[in-house]
Amino acid sequence: MRGGRWRKVASQVGRSATVWAVSTVTMLVLAGILPDFRLQSPDGESATHIAVTAAVGAGAFGLLSALAWPLLVRLLLLVPALVLGLLVFVLNGSLLLVALRLNPASSAEAAPETAVVVAAVMSAVASATGAALAVRDDDAYRRRLYRLSDRRRRRGPAGPSTPGTVFLQLDGVGHDVLVAAAEKGLMPTVARWLESTHRLTPWRTDWSSQTGASQLGILHGSNHDIPAFRWYEKDTREVMVCNRPTSAAELQRRAVERTGDGGLLSADGASRGNLFSGGADEQALVLSIATRRRGRENRSRAGYFAYFSDPANAVRTAMSFVAEVGREIGQSTRSRFRKQRPRVARGGLYPLVRAFATVVERDVVVAAVMGDLLAGRTAVYADLVAYDEVAHHSGPMSRDAEKVLERLDRALALIANVAEHAPRPYRIVVLSDHGQSPGETFRSRYGLGLGELVRAGCGLPVPRKARRTRSGAEARAAVRAALRRPVEAGGEQQHPARRRSEPLVLASGNLGLVSFPDVPHRMSKEEIDARHPALLTTLANHPGVGFLLVRSEEHGGVVLGAQGAEIPLDALDDKSGPLAVFGPGAADAVRRTHSFAHTADIMVNSSHDPADGEVLAFEEQIGSHGGLGGAQGRPFLLSPLALSEPVGDGLDLVGAEQVHHVLRRWLRESNGPQVPLSTEPEERAA
C-alpha cells in the first residue's frame, strides 16, 4: 500500500518536472523568435544565466497559473462568456509578466502584447505535455478531468455498481440526416453503435417542432400550451419566447405545476447547456436559471468557470473559435460567389454567433459532461446546438452542416471514452429534439413577408415594394372585393377601427401566428371575417400557405385551405383535405394545439412539397423547423440494446411527452434512485 503511494508520488513529480522542462525550452525558443521578448540584458549574459532565468520564469508561471488562475476566473463569473474568453488571454499574459518579475536577478522583459502570445503558447504546450504523459495513467487522467469540471463531489475509487445514464441531445439533427451521415462515414462512432450496441428509433414531434416545446416535454413531462417558439399571450399581454430566460423560467414553472414533480433529472441529475433544468441538482449553462441568484454550483455560467479554470482550455477554444469564424466567412463567400440557392444573409455578427455555438458551447458542455461521468452522477442530460445553428443558415444537408456532424461525432467518441474511466458503468442515449426541413424563405419566393401579407389582407398600409408584388396586389384586390369599395390610387383606405385592430404577426420557422392584441379572447372565424372580410381568404388561398387553424363558433375549430376548403376539427383526418400532404399524425397535432389556452387567433402553416420535403420559412432561414412538413417533425432516439424497446412493435413514438415517459422507464430499469412518477397521460389529458 505504502509502496503504491510512493510510486504515485514519484510519477506525479516526474510528470511535473517534465512539464517544467518543456515549458523552459518553450520559453527559450520564444525568446529567440520574438523580438519583443528577451531573457537577457542588452549587454548579453551567459547561457547558464539565461537558462536559469527561463527555468525560474517557467516555474513561476506554472505555479501562478495553478494557484491564482482559478481565483481570477471565479471573480469573472458574471462576465459574459465571449468577454471572458478574451480576458483569459489578457490575464494569462499578466501572470507571465508577474512571473518574470519574481526573479530579482533576471533582466527578462516582454512587451504586454508579446506576453499574451508567449503565455498562450506556453499554456498550450504545458497542457499538451501533461495530457500526453497522463494518457497511460488512469488516475492522472481522472484527476485532470475533475479539474476541468471543478467537481467538488469526491467519490471513492469504487463507484455505484448500477449503471448511470447520459442523454446527449444533438439539436436539430433529424432521423434521416443521422442515417445518411452514418452511411457516408461522417459519423463513424454512430455507425459503429448502430452496427453493434444501439438501436435507432424515429419519433414524431408535436405541431410545434422546436427545442422549447420538445425539450420541455422531454425533461419535464409536459409541453402543454406551447403553440410555437414565440407567441403572444393576451391575458398577460406578453410575447413569450422559448429561448428568453424569463420565458424559459415561466414555462418550466408551469410544467412542474402541471405534472407535480421536478423532472427527469430530479434524482442525482445534471443538466448541461439546456433551456430547462429537468429538476437537476447540478445545472450549468441552463437558460431557465439564468436570471436567478444562486450558489456557484447552480449558477448558469458555472460551466464556464469549470472550463476556463484551465488556461490551456481557453487557448485551445479561442484558436478553434477564430478558425470557425474564418471558416464561416469563407463558406459564406463561396456560397455567394457560386450564387447558390436558396441562400440567406450570413454577415454581421452571425460568424461570431456560429463560432460560439459550434466551438465554445460544445467545448464547455462536453467538459461538463465528462466531469459528471467521473463524478458518478446517475443521470446527465446535455444539449449540443452546433448543427441546428449552422443548418439554419447553410441548409440541413449542406457541406457546412456535414462538417459540424463530423465534429459532433468526435465529441460523442470522447464522451464514450471518458465513460470507460468513470467510477460506474454508463449507458449513452443519443437523441434529437426535432429535425430541419429545407426550403427557401417565404419572402424570397413571393417578395413579401407573412406580416406584410396579413396587413395587406386587413387593408392596412404595407411598404411600396410589398404592394407591387403579385401577392400584395392580390391581397389588396381581395380587400376591395370584400369591402365592395375602391381603393384610392395613393394607397389603402384608412379606417381608425382597423388601426386599433392591427395584428401582431410572429414566426416560428414555417409556422406563423396572427393575434389581435386589442381583443382579450381568442377570436373566432366569424369575428375575424366581420372585422377583416378578406384576411382569411387571402391567407388560405395563398400558394405559400398550406392551411390555417381558427376557432369557430359553430364547429369549435376549423382548418381552412385553398379554394374554400373548411373542415371542422372533429371531421379532420390525415388522408384528405389540406393536411393530406403533411403525413400521419398531422390532424392529431392540430387538434391538440387547438385545445391550448394561448393558441393564436390564426395559426398559419406554410405549404409543403412532399416530393422534396421543402417548406417555406416565415423567418430568414433555409433550414427551418417549428411547424408541420418534412424532416423537421422526425427526430430520432438512439438507445443501447441493454435498455427496453422504446415502443412496441407496430406502434409509433409520438410527442415529446411520450419520449419523457420512455426515458423515465429507462432510468428505473437501471435500478438506481427511483424517479418519481408523474400524473398519467390519460389523467393529464382529462
Image: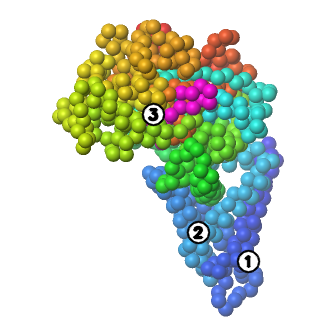
- Classify residue 553 as left or right of residue 41: left
Q: Provide residue 667's location: percent of width, then percent of height.
A: 62, 21
42 vs 65, nearest the viewer: 42
Secondary structure, mark 1, is helix
Callout 1: 10 Å neighbours few (<14), some, many (20+)?
Answer: some
232 vs 383, nearest the viewer: 232
Q: Amino acid at mark 3?
A: Ser
Q: Quadrant of the C terminus?
A: top left
Q: Report, in whole angstroms, how far the alpha carbon at label 3 lies from the one at label 2.
A: 44 Å
Mark 3 — residue? 508
Q: Provide residue 195's location: percent of width, then percent of height.
A: 79, 28
- Tell me which residue sits at (72%, 23%) in the image: 199
Q: Report, in whole angstroms, how far the alpha carbon at label 1 lies from the one at label 3.
A: 63 Å
- Tell me which residue sits at (51%, 22%) in the image: 206
Secondary structure, mark 2, is helix
Mark 1 — residue? 51
Q: Earlier in the sequence, mark 2 or mark 1?
A: 1
